[in-house]
Image (cartoon, rainbow, N blue to C red):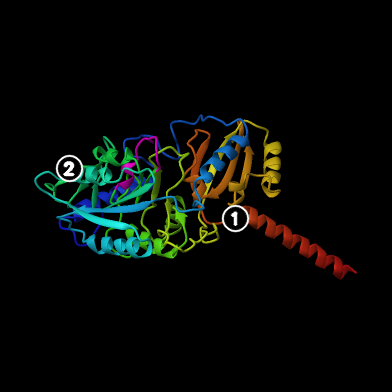
Amino acid sequence: MEGTNAPDESSTLAELEDMELVEDSGYSSGDASSRLHPERLDFDHINTLETFTEDLNQALSGSFPRPSYPYSSVNCLFLSWADDDLNVQLEILQLQEVFERQFRFTTKEFKIPSKPNPTRALQDELYAFQNAHQDENELLIVYYAGHGEADYRRGRSIWCANLHKDSPSLNWSSLQHLLETAIPHVLIILDCCFAANAARDTTEGTTKELLAACGRENPTLGVGERSFTSALIEELKAFQSNPFTVAMLHSRLICMRWRLKYTPILAMLSEKSTPSIHLAPIPVEGTSPPTGLELGASIDTRVLLAVSVAQNTEFIVTDWTNWLNTHQAPAEILKIDVRIESAYKSHSTLILLSVPTLAWSRMVDRDAYNFIGFVRSENLLRKSEVQDLDATKQEKLTGSKLAR
């Protein structure tokens, strides 16, 4: 994690900046292929857009809050190093206060000791934490703030107390399985550099989700107004007493990309058919819980996708557009705005669609689906063409009236 008060950090930050340039230029570490000239150009196709519709509907089916509160209890564990040099305790206390006062969650802190064995100490704490909660109706939240190291060769999630060469460290990837195999639902929140390295293969059972401050090859900012945790606290407060899901929270955080240096990552550690974790204040006996927020204009960042379809262009675009506009689509899809931005004849049919990040983050992976980028507007060229057409019509109408 980048910080302003960490000792011996200048050289490491310079290395991180170099890495940022590599990342932004389109190259991935250890991969000679570029995003502009990928080594692989042949992708699978889906037979019809119905497959995309089914995948989208499945992604959305668990993306919205449940009608009733799903958990018997919510317990949070806050992790940081005893020898922390980033002053993360400031933001930990703020986040703890939000979880305790606004959400009425139970919280506890654990400082990872540097000696004699930080890995064994954290392992024992995690084991005790999950062993104390053996009910599938419970929710466990584990949050970590501190340094993370890059591990390009093995892709492991490495945590360290500081940036000295002899800093105490541990391999989080070897410990995370204690949470992935836990009986309750689990949300892991990591505010550290290279946080998405903790994303692993999916497991069966209850929902397990990872909310990471940044991608596998990115650093992140330390304590301050632009930190991931600062943005997280702000968004949690903004939901007030309304129920929401981690998928919805992630969408809101992506909308704050202008403030954050890097894009937060949401990774499913369980099957994507499991519902996204439900977050809301624990109900007070004798009161009715709020019904939830509508997915409104505040979530305005969308994802542009390229979808390869082995079907005739004119037929599927016309039919699918009519299907969306006549409310024949599944109920979950009608809750969001799915747009066909463009379509082209290719070796098959290439369709560009935009969907809310809420839908994209939980969609099943297929070779026929390709992420293009985040967008915050409609198709500007098409909008310009419509405006030019309207202006031309107006000119003709004005000219006709003058001729009379």
Q: Is residue 131 left or right of residue 207?
A: left
View extreme (left): residue? 116
Residue at which label 1 appears: 380
Q: Amino acid at mark 2?
A: Thr
Above or below, 7 against 323 in this view is below
Q: Residue at x 52, y 37 (%)?
A: 369
Estimate how packed mark 1 is, as few (under 14), some (14 to 19) or many (20 or more) residues with alpha carbons within 10 Å.
few
User: Can residue 55 be seen in the rendering of this structure?
Assistant: yes
How many labels, in total?
2
Magenta segment includes 321: no
Q: Main secondary structure of the magenta part?
A: loop
Front label number (2 vs 1): 2
Could you say where residue 124 lies in the image, as x and y percent from the top left?
18, 43
| Disc 2 target residue | 119
Question: Badge 2: how crowded within 10 Å, few (<14), some, or many (20+)?
Answer: many
Q: Is 96 or 231 nearer to us in this picture?
A: 96
User: Where 7 sits versus 152, above or below?
Assistant: below
Quadrant of the frame with the C terminus: bottom right
What secondary structure is marked by label 2? helix
Residues in magenta, as a range: 194-207
Q: Amino acid at mark 1?
A: Leu
- 4 displayed left or right of 333: left
- Tell me the element at label 1: helix
* Disc on res. 245: none
The residue nearer to you, when weighing 287 against 90, is 287
Upstream in sequence: badge 2 or badge 1? 2
Vertical relation: 100 (above or below) 153:
below
Measured in 3D between alpha carbons, the distance from the residue under mark 2 to the one under mark 1, in whole angstroms, is: 52 Å
Q: Is residue 293 left or right of residue 107?
A: right
